[in-house]
């Protein structure tokens, strides 16, 4: 572990790189985490950084991402910028010996994600892709049920996610911003499949879908075939609101993660006896704030933030076992395959992102 990046005061000091909507929600979630403190933020303009800092009571504001990453009072950087910048901004923070939590997708492709993982490991720094759903109590309970064989041998997983994004949602519809449904929302159902079949590589991946005029994926249906007659199916769309639940089918019953599955609070287990078991997990009460959440269930970002804080501050770990770097790399490679089948190509696929 790189000693200069970890506070000796028993408090993990966060720097926020990017002052957009998701960063707003993350900071509000972080407010519920003991031993965590936001000490600085940075945006492309000083006015934006100062406004964000005033809203959240952040003492230091920068108009330079480099200045933020050079700040010696920061232990860990949260990267909340657009998809196209996840790789260079993470590399910047790591190069200045900062631990990093980077929004999903980790990068636009596996090559860049592997670049980030390699640098973090060479420096002994913590790195994680912000797959926040994995840390919800409901998901932790699902994993426990599966490990205990609650529904027997798992044979299939079905997961979906869809939103009717407006035409003004540039991060979805513009190819030069890393747009498309797969990297933004399709990664969620894919991560449910990889959670149910951990450390396994599908023997076949079948994809159908369509592209917009700008070359980004509008929808897709993907089937992942695994050995021993098992499979996962996922679908996503940028044109329609889906129910968004996950169904896991086993030899002794089925398990359902109720909608919205990416911010889950209800899990049902049906063993075919006539009475399904219902498990409910209430979201925490938000901390008092001058701001408001932009996305539903975002108070649950506190679970992810607490896991990262615990891993760095108490476990002295360089990754979280609940969502390891190997899984991020697997999903990045899987999404490369799906994009290739759909015909989605980003500039970063040809030209690596450099600082």
Image (spheres, grey):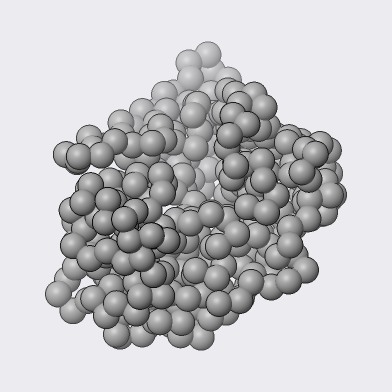
The quarter of the rendered structure image containing the N terminus is bottom left
Left or right of residue 321: residue 118: right
In percent of the image, x 41 and y 35: which residue is there? 295
| Percent coordinates x, y for residue 129 in the rendering | 50, 59
Q: Is residue 324 above or below residue 140?
A: below
Q: Residue at x 35, y 44 (%)?
A: 25
Q: Can the viewer see residue 227 in this picture?
A: no
Q: Is residue 102 visible?
A: yes
Tell me: residue 117, above or below residue 253: below
Residue most extreme to the top: 274
For residue 233, above or below residue 14: above
Q: Residue at x 36, y 28 (%)?
A: 280
Residue 88 sits above or below residue 285 on the image: below
What percent of the width, then of the height, locates residue 45? Answer: 38, 60
Looking at the picture, how far across and down is residue 154, in whole percent?
Answer: 65, 40
Instruction: Give 5 or 239, whichever is nearer the viewer.
Output: 239
Residue 106, quarter of the rendered image: bottom right
Residue at position x 27%, y 64% in the image: 61
Spot occupied by residue 135 in the image (x, y as percentages of width and height)? 41, 48
């Amino acid at each position: 572990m790189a000693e200069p990046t970890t506070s000796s005061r028993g408090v993990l000091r966060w720097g926020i790189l990017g002052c957009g909507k998701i960063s707003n929600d993350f900071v509000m979630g972080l407010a519920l985490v003991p031993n965590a403190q936001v000490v600085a933020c940075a945006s492309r303009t000083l006015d934006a950084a100062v406004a964000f800092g005033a809203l959240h009571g952040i003492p230091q504001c920068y108009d330079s991402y480099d200045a933020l990453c050079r700040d010696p009072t920061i232990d860990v950087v949260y990267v909340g910028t657009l998809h196209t910048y996840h790789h260079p901004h993470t590399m910047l923070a790591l190069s200045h010996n900062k631990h990093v939590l980077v929004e999903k997708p980790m990068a636009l492709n596996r090559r860049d994600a592997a670049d980030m993982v390699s640098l973090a490991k060479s420096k002994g720094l913590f790195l994680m892709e912000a797959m926040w759903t994995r840390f919800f109590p409901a998901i932790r309970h699902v994993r426990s049920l599966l490990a205990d064989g609650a529904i027997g041998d798992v044979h299939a997983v079905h997961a979906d996610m869809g939103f009717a994004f407006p035409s003004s949602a540039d991060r979805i519809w513009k190819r030069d911003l890393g747009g498309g449904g797969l990297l933004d929302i399709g990664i969620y159902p894919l991560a449910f499949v990889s959670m149910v079949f951990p450390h396994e590589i599908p023997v076949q991946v079948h994809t159908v879908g369509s592209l917009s005029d700008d070359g980004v994926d509008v929808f897709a249906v993907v089937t992942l075939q695994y050995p021993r007659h098992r499979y996962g199916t996922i679908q996503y769309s940028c044109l329609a609101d889906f129910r968004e639940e996950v169904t896991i089918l086993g030899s002794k019953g089925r398990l359902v993660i109720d909608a919205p599955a990416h911010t889950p609070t209800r899990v049902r287990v049906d063993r075919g006896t006539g009475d399904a078991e219902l498990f409910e997990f209430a979201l925490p009460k938000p901390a008092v704030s001058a701001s408001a959440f932009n996305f539903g269930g975002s108070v649950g970002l506190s679970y992810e933030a607490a896991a990262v804080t615990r891993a760095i501050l108490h476990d002295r770990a360089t990754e979280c076992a609940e969502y390891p770097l190997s899984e991020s790399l697997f999903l990045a490679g899987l999404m490369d395959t799906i994009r290739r089948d759909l015909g989605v190509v980003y500039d970063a696929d040809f030209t690596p992102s450099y600082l």
